[in-house]
Amino acid sequence: MLCQICKKKEATITIAKVVGEQKTEFHLCKDCAAVFSDKISIFPLPQFNINDLLAGLLKAIDLYNKEEGIVPAKEIKCKNCGLTYEEFKQSGKLGCSVCYHDFRDQLTPLLRRLYGSSEHIGKIPRRARGKLNKIKKIKQLRKELREVVIKEEYEKAAKIRDEILKLEGVLKK
Amino acid sequence: MQNNRKETLLQNLKKSTAEWTSGQGSLSDIVISSRIRLARNMEGIPFPSRADKAELKNIFELSKQVVDKSSLFRDSNLLLLDELSSLENQFLVEKHLISIYHAREKHLYRGCVFNQKETLSIMINEEDHFRIQYLLSGLQLNKIWEFINQIDDEIGKKVTYAFSEKEGYLTSCPTNVGTGLRASVMLHLPALVMVNRVNDVLKAISKIGYVVRGFYGEGTEVMGNLFQVSNQITLGLSEEEIIDNLEKVNQQIISQEQKMRKNLLSESKSQLEDQVWRAYGILSNARIISSAETMKLLSKLRFGVELGIISYPGLGTINKLMLLIQPAYLQILSGKELSPYDRDLQRAILIRNKITYSRERMCI
């Protein structure tokens, strides 16, 4: 039998690790065993790897989508950076902010499974704060505009229209 | 000119000690330090793993402008990590200024901003464009949030962050999306380890969304009975809630540790004293010592100080020693590369000096 670590030399040493009632055996060569025995003397952490969890969840979501007849995610590609969904599944890393938009159908269930929620309720960056407020303001002005037009107050309407155009111009920038 | 600056910065880092090693702050007998980091990206530029050279440079230059112009970064400096040797990169890892991942990453324009007290460090072009971290000694998560929130706003004046109303701050890995906030607390838990309870405690907290890591973060081993407990959930909760929950979880662990310490002191005081003084004996007399053995013994010694069995060296000295004896730090201090055997020799000398010095000071 070959050593389980280097997979080159013959395994001559068996190390048994007993945690609670669970026993795991490792078959190693002399050199790897020396390194390994050093490592296991150090306290073992509970094995939890977020990337493994992510990969598992992604597979489950793919399977679910297939059953539901949703387009296989494989063919999806980010329009901005060109990352394919398949590449994302392998690395667990997205390529750019647009990926979140282009893979949203796949990501939303993933985020819900990871976090129990897919909605951000925390801090909003200052710049976006301004933008979000402007969008709100435009909506409100449009409503006002409709009202004044009905009342035939055209002078007021022109003022509101200018304000909307100005805000939209700022947003476009 | 640039090289001179780099040399000066490294020289300063060699001599400086970080605030978080001071052994001060709330509950410093169990809590070494608290940390918060925020993951941020700039809108319109691919994340570092998919950005090209010009885009990475763009992010780096922008960081330089922010550091140069804002008064919040008055005492901060920016290092271009590409210019540093792998030993120097490793040294910054051991100082907790950058992650292991950042030190080993191959792409260009990797940077690190840090302030004089080493409470702030910003990794530029790590997994995300900006990884802002703030560290303080003891349990001080709320204070850290106050500081880091300000720094985040300051950078946000210059940088339009990648943000969506729905998913929040957008990050390279979906496991950071939302707040992009990871808070962690570094705990010294020798009593829970000694009575074999630590595994139960850590298993329990991993079931409710918390992660335990080693001294140097993700993927590193536990040494010196030091455990880093951090939140896993970054989306669907506000920053304040995440911090508050983490603090509560840590208070639970701390009270368990305190209880065990009390029990141990009342039931096996002589054995404890024996272990602490033996650790002191080896540390102050060894001629050859590995970093693994040193961390084990320093933990025992720290335990002795925490329990009042021994009054020197102080917690601050022990915290600092835990960094100074690391392989790269030791070589940087010696000014040359050392073989593992030479490091074990140098390490023993360094520890003897520090410990004898602190004893002499106590006796005056």
Image (spheres, rainbow, N blue to C red):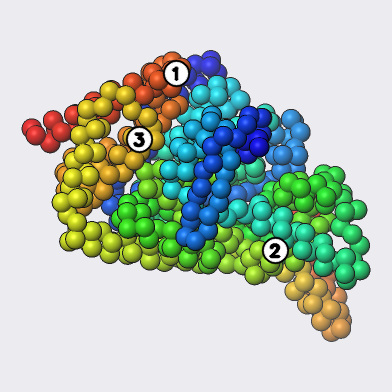
Question: Residue B128 at what x, y percent from top left?
Answer: 65, 44
Question: Residue A107 at what x, y percent from top left?
Answer: 76, 61
Q: Nearer the viewer, mark 2 or mark 3?
A: 3
User: The C terminus of chain B lies in which quarter of the figure?
Assistant: top left
Task: Tell me the residue at 74%/31% (across/down).
Answer: B54
Q: Look at the numbered discs 2 and 3 and tell me whether their residues touch, using CB distance below 8 Å.
A: no
Tag 3: amino acid: Glu
* Horizontal side, residue B15 vs residue B91: left or right: left
Which secondary structure, mark 3? helix
Tag 2: amino acid: Leu
Kindly identify which residue carries mark 2. Answer: A111
Q: Nearer the viewer, mark 2 or mark 1?
A: 1
Q: Nearer the viewer, residue B151 or B167?
A: B167
Kindly identify which residue carries mark 3. Answer: B293
* Cα distance between the residues tagged 3 and 1: 17 Å
Kindly identify which residue carries mark 1. Answer: B339
Q: In which chain is the residue bearing label 2?
A: A
Q: Work out whether mark 3 precedes mark 1 in sequence or the reverse, and give the earlier one.
A: 3
Task: Tell me the residue at 35%/38% (across/down).
Answer: B295
